[in-house]
Structures are given as C-alpha cells and as structure tokens.
Image: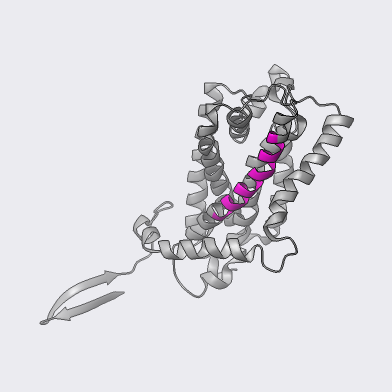
Amino acid sequence: MLVMGAVGGRPEYEVVIERTHGWLRIDWRALWEYRDLFKMLVQRDCTTRYRQTLLGPLWFVLQPVFTTLVFAVVFGRVAGIPTDGLPAPLFYLCGLLGWNYFTQNLTTGGATFVNNAHLFGKVYFPRLIVPASVVTANLVAFALQLLPFAAFFVWFHFTGRLGTAALTWRVLFVPLPLLQIAVLSLGVGLCMSALTAKYRDLIHLTQYLIQIWMFATPIIYPISKVPAKWQWILWANPMSVPIEAFRLCLLGQGGFTTGAMVLSVGLTLLLLFVGVAAFERVERTVIDSV
C-alpha cells in the first residue's frame, strides 16, 4: 500500500507497507519507535501482578524463603546433601535468585501469543516488544528477592556462621549472569510461544520442562558433589554457569571453567537466534489461529 502527501503537485513522502521476507528480519527501527509502548507494557506487568492480591509484592519475598526452608529440611537434613561449607539458606537462596527469574520469564513469555491474542488482533506493533517487556518487568521481582538473601547474609555474618561465604569485589559482576539468564529465558520463551501458538496444550509442557530443568541445574546440590564423569551433563546445561556465577559473585564460592562459560554463552545465543527466528515466522499467521 502506498500513501503520499503532496506539496505543489509533487509527492512529499511515501510509506510502503509490505510483508517481511526471510525467517529472521527484525525491524529495529520499529522497536525503537514503539519504545513508549514497551514502557507501558512493563508498567502494566508490574501493576497488574499485584492487583487484587492479599500481600502484593511481599509474595516475591516469601516465595524464595518458603522454598529455601523446604530445601533445607528435605535436601539438607533428610537427604544430607552438603553445600560445600556454605550456610544452607544462603546456598539455596543464591541459586533460587537466578532460577526464579528464569522460570518467571519462561512461564509468562512462553504463552505470549495465547495471552495477548486480543491485543495482537486489534493493533499492529512489533510483537517482540511483549516478551521483551516481560523479561524487563520481572527484574522488579528479582530485586525484591534480593532482600531475603541480604537479610540472611547479614544475620549469618553477625552470628559468625557464614562458613566459607564471603562478600568480595566480585559482587560488581552480578549483572553479567543476570543478563545471560535474561537472554536465555527470552530465547527459550520465544521458542515455547511459537509452539504454544499452534498447539495450546503445550503450555502444560512448560511446567514439566521447568521441573526437569531445575534438577539438571546445580541449585540444590554443589557441582563438586557430582562425579567428574557426569559433570559434562551439567555444563551442557546453559543455566549451570550463570547459577554458579551468582554464587561466586554473592558468596565468593562457585566454580566453572572457561570452556564451560564459552559453551554456556554460545548455547544461550543459539537459543536466542532460534527463538527469534521461530517467533518471527509464527507471528505472520498466528492471529488467524489463536
């Protein structure tokens, strides 16, 4: 379609609207032009999440605390899984920081087309804005979950029970694993949203995927307790390195090799590329089917 404005009989401008070609063609200019919509969606996600709730944002503080207590009893006391000299609450809370952020992004982002069909069918805007806004809005929950971790750390410090935990200059590098988790969850969420757009029952698969993925990630156990011949399985999981990086930055203890880090970052970028390609391909016709 061609739209023109004329001045003195000559066209002043023209706008050509055409369909995208290829599997991966991101309109960066459109994403920038719709930045105000991105801000509005982030604000919407932050406010509607606490609307008509009894405790509001406090849920994001209580959830990791209750989960940590369960882990400490079941895996620490009953199963006797060690935590490499770290206080069990700090060990579990630190792992849950990155993991909860990942699962929140994946759960919401994986149903992008299903949850926003009413919006996509009424007005055009770059669809990538929606899952990107989810990843950004969940940073608020991540910040809230830092509070119980900080409280436990201060309490263990003043009671002299920190063990091998120590807060060092590495805390400045916390944004790096957080960024990787954001990119990874965005890529996997885009893949899941492309699948659930055509097969809605796959939404239920997301929860099973999260549960299995958690046990393949060193959250309730240290990597040092995994036999050396099986550790390659953990390093093939792109979430293992950022979880260990969180422990290294916040507790001063955590280990991963350079090779494992390169593999993790490489898989993260690959999943992002595949997710964007699948998302871009599905969004062209998905409104007619959802």
Tell me what residue is drawn at x 72 percent, y 65 percent: 53
Q: Is 141 colored magenta in this rendering?
A: yes
* Image location (x, y in percent) of residue 236: 61, 30
* Image location (x, y in percent) of residue 102: 62, 45
Tell me if residue 179 comes above or below residue 233 in the rendering: below
Left or right of residue 218, residue 140 in this image: left
Q: Quadrant of the C terminus?
A: bottom right
Q: Quadrant of residue 45?
A: bottom right
Left or right of residue 144, residue 86 in this image: right
Tell me if residue 55 comes above or below residue 147 in the rendering: below
Please name whichever residue, 212 or 197, is drawn nearer the observer in this view of the structure: 212
Please name whichever residue, 68 or 13, is drawn nearer the observer in this view of the structure: 68
Q: Which residue lies most toward the right here?
A: 78
Left or right of residue 211, residue 40 in this image: left
Tell me if residue 161 comes above or below residue 54 in the rendering: above
Q: Is 255 colored magenta in this rendering?
A: no
Q: Which residue lies most toward the bottom here?
A: 9
Which region shows up in magenta? 137-154
Please name whichever residue, 265 or 140, is drawn nearer the observer in this view of the structure: 140
Q: Which residue lies most toward the left here?
A: 8
Tell me what residue is drawn at x 68 percent, y 35 percent: 154
Left or right of residue 7, residue 219 in this image: right
Q: Dominant secondary structure of the magenta stretch?
A: helix
Please name whichever residue, 111 or 22, is drawn nearer the observer in this view of the structure: 111
* Image location (x, y in percent) of residue 239: 61, 36
Tell me if residue 19 comes above or below residue 231 in the rendering: below
* Image location (x, y in percent) of residue 60: 69, 52
Tell me what residue is drawn at x 37 percent, y 58 percent: 32
Q: Quadrant of residue 230?
A: top right
| Residue 22 visible from this viewpoint | yes
